Image: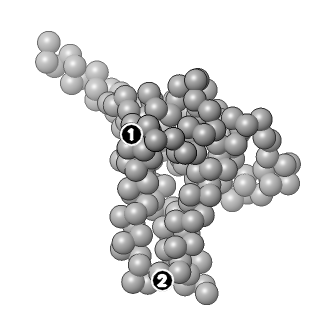
Amino acid sequence: MLEAIAVAWLLLVLGDFLSTFFYHVPEHVFGSLHLKTHHSWKKNFRHYAILTLNIQVLLDGILGALPYLIVAIFLWSFSPIGVIAGLLLGQFHVWWRHVTALGWQTPKLVATLCQLLFITTPERHWLHHQKTSLGFGDIFTFFEQPAQVWLRWLRLLRMRFRYSRI
């Protein structure tokens, strides 16, 4: 039982790390798929929950989930139940963090528990939808500060690359 819990937690932390630093933040600097499909003010909960058949939305979701799936492959031999639980918890969190679009607010006790566990709440994630340079970390808030540094560094790299080609 403890092994399954440890594997689920490890899958979520490593998956969030890889997704944040190798897909999400770089996509905000160098790409447009994520910004176009996920951060438009015209999107609704159906869109965020990937209940749409828009191929770009599905691709963005798959690319964001790919790091979790890669970690799942490596952790499978330790605990298949932990991997399945971690993937289910991760998907539940994707849906939950987008309920702000429905007008839902996190109860105070749940928000306090999430703050203690460094878990992103729907309100925190909505901040990311409003100000795309804030609120990184799909699941865990402790990736926020390192993601900010990574974002600034990648923006400088992009500017340097642009000016070096002129």
How far from the left and from the top, in percent, is residue 6? 55, 77
Q: Residue furthest right?
A: 108
Residue in view at x 38 percent, y 56 percent: 66
Q: Is residue 78 above or below residue 145?
A: below
Mark 2 highlights which residue?
79
Residue in view at x 77 percent, y 35 percent: 103
Q: Earlier in the sequence, mark 2 or mark 1?
A: 1
Residue in view at x 43 percent, y 61 percent: 68
**Disc 1 element:** helix
Q: Residue furthest bottom?
A: 1
Crowd class of label 1 (few under 14; some 14 to 19; many from 20; radius 10 Å): few
Q: Is residue 110 left or right of residue 59?
A: right
Give residue 55's mark: 1
How far from the left and from the top, in percent, is residue 85? 57, 72
Q: Label 1 amino acid? A: Ile
Nearer to me, 3 or 34:
34
Q: Is residue 86 above or below residue 132?
A: below
Q: Marks 2 and 1: which is nearer the front?
A: 1
Nearer to me, 49 or 159:
49
Q: Label 2 amino acid? A: Ser
